[in-house]
Amino acid sequence: MKKVIVIVGFGPGTSRAIAEKFGREGFAVALVGRTRERLDAGVAALKEQGIEAAAFVADAGNPASITSAIESARSTLGPITALQWTAYSTPIGDVTTASPDEVRAAFDVPLVGLVAALQAALPDLEAQKGSLLVTNGGLGFFDPEVDKVAVSWGVMGLALGNAAKHKLVGLLAQKLPERGVHVGEVVITGTVKGTSFDQGNATIDPTTVANAFWSLHTERSQVSVTI
């Protein structure tokens, strides 16, 4: 049976490297994101490498939108073997001045959207003994120095989202193995080369992240890896 990975939050750097790694290992690749031009370029680049790929425009923070994308990916490429979540948002910088709606929005992508995507893909993941693979960031760690950085950088919303996502991964890692689904997370604690955060001083090669996700998917022995 053909294997399919759905990558939500496609962009340069990390998710592109993941798409290429899994594609080279025989997976068809579904790219999901908000920008049609970026997705189409990603599909074209993968096809040049002989990798089957398709693009699906969706808002990762909108449950109806992301559910529709998952269903379209299944209809186009086949049952889903791995769901990879790289999507993130930075809706608030300072929780002391943010409105209640803005605070809620901090969890739209890392919690609400991720859970909606998982629920849509779960029958396939369970049938294929597949994986949920989550990209996360070190700003979610419970550490005073990390919190100090999040406040000084004005990314309190991102830190909250990362922390909530990390807890969700832990909960799902307890819940889903009984259904044959492995849950894995890579926590990135620096800047990845080629991403929008790279100002020329990034130190993490995106292929390192991609290889870590491949190991999580194939070895199924670890839940969280920090890079």
Image: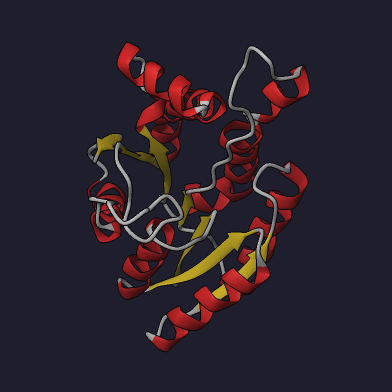
Instruction: Answer with the quarter of the image where residue 128 lies.
Output: bottom left
Position above or below: 1 against 190? below
Q: Position of residue 46 (x, y in %)?
A: 44, 79
Q: Measured along the vertical axis of the image, is residue 152 above or below residue 45?
A: above
Tell which of 132 and 31 is nearer to you.
31
Q: Which residue is drawn at 35% across and 66% down?
A: 22
Relative to residue 46, is residue 170 depicted above or below? Answer: above
Residue 95 in view: yes
Question: In terms of image quadrants, where is residue 185?
Answer: top left
Residue 181 visible in this rendered orientation of the protein: no
Which residue does the image show at 38% across and 56% down from the upper left? 14
Identify the residue shown where x is 42% and y is 49%.
197
Percent x, y of residue 27 = 40, 70
Q: How is the image coloured?
A: secondary structure
Q: In which quarter of the image is the N terminus?
A: bottom left
Say whether residue 14 is left or right of residue 160: left
Q: Residue 221: image x %, image y %? A: 22, 39
Most foreground residue, 151 or 219 = 151
Question: Could you say which quadrant of the image residue 206 lies in?
Answer: bottom left
Q: Looking at the figure, which quarter contains the C terminus?
A: top left
* Residue at left offset 77%, top offset 47%: 64
Left or right: residue 42 versus residue 24 is right
Residue 204 horizontal/vertical position (percent): 25, 51
Give the camera-side residue of 54 and 206: 206
Question: How many numbered discs, if any?
Answer: 0
